[in-house]
Amino acid sequence: MAETRINSGWIKGVGFIALLSAAAYLAAGVRFIKEAGLSPVVIAIIIGMAAGNAGGRFIPSSWNSGFAFCQKRILRLAVILFGFRITFTQIAEIGAAGITADAAMLISTFAVGLLIARLLKMDRDTAILCAAGSSICGAAAVMAAEAVIKPEPHKTAAAVGTVVLFGTLAMFLYPVFFSFSGMTANEFGIYIGSTIHEAAQAVVAGEAVHAPETAVIAKLGRVMLLAPFLLILSAMVNRENKVARIQIPWFALMFVAAAAFNTFIDLPQAVLSAVNTADTFMLAAAMAALGIETRADKIKNVGAAPLVCAAAMFIWLTAGGYLINMVIINITG
């Protein structure tokens, strides 16, 4: 394929993306940015969009093959390595209540997103991307879904933007809501993990209510549901495109395999830390490459519909998620 043909333009394109990813990684370590819960992955798309819009005309077209490689190949590898952040043991620790809450919120939020998108007459790709980001694990879910449906880059960027906006808002609102929730810290941690957008945001909100471990584990349970979601999404796309042969996203299966390996093989912490760092760097690279191809005029053409759709899902996640979690708490008591 053209995007994998190695030449000087490809090397320079990949090298440029690596520099942007490194810049995002360093910026994420700055204290006030870290406290705001902004991950290198989110910062990378901002830097990429800035580079694409401010200096896009100075970037040689021969570099595009390197950008495409990062958007596709590097992204899939990053999704696989994401599995090393999870173990089946961690998922089991949150119990039936946590797993049920995660599944209920994923299914209901995705359904709400698609319904609102249809009412707003949004295109299919943008609707799926926005719904995936809100219902599963933020930007990582958007990028994973992007690898299945293969939309135009600016649609993916619009979806990531909504996740960043409302996920950040939730991160600051949830701790305020805790004192009025009637939940214990542990129960509220499950609520955070099952409804907030990004894993980093779950950490910040969880720490604020003294339940970071529960919040993160509940969030990881939602992340684990990314694999079956991708399989179902792939089947839907195949059916819509009238593809007779079943096309399974192999990287989704490898994601589960990585989680299984991490569960049954006790890797040294230093190795896991290195893998997670590499994974974050790769996700940031994919985001930066996506950002470069996202021009302001294209984002403008998407309109306000994704923002309205994401707002509706945010309301459902916070209010509907609270009701669902309270019902589950009362049932499992």
Image (spheres, rainbow, N blue to C red):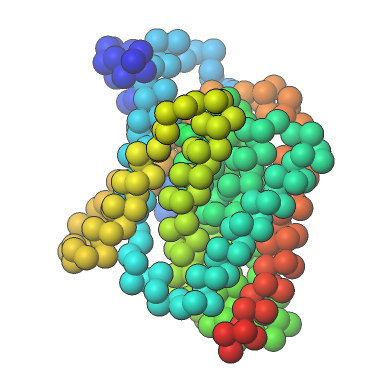
Q: Is residue 311 visible?
A: yes
Q: Is residue 104 positioned above or below 156 on the image?
A: below
Which residue is outermost to the front?
Answer: 244
Which residue is outermost to the right?
Answer: 119
Question: Which x, y percent locates residue 309?
Answer: 74, 46
Is 99 in front, or is 306? 99
Is 178 in front, or is 319? 319
Question: Which x, y percent locates residue 37?
Answer: 53, 58
Residue at horizontal 29 percent and vertical 52 percent from the top: 257
Q: Is residue 258 positioned above or below 239 on the image?
A: below
Residue at horizontal 60 percent and vertical 40 percent from the top: 129
Q: Residue 176 falls in which quadrant of the image?
A: bottom right
Is 213 situated left or right of 122 in this image? left
Which residue is outermost to the bottom?
Answer: 333
Is 63 in front, or is 181? 181
Residue at horizontal 74 percent and vertical 34 percent from the top: 122
Residue at horizontal 67 percent and vertical 23 percent from the top: 298
Q: Is residue 321 positioned above or below 294 on the image?
A: below
Is 199 situated left or right of 164 in this image? left
Question: Which x, y percent locates residue 4?
Answer: 31, 19
Question: Which x, y percent locates residue 152?
Answer: 58, 25
Location of the N terminus (image quadrant): top left
Q: Is residue 282 visible?
A: no
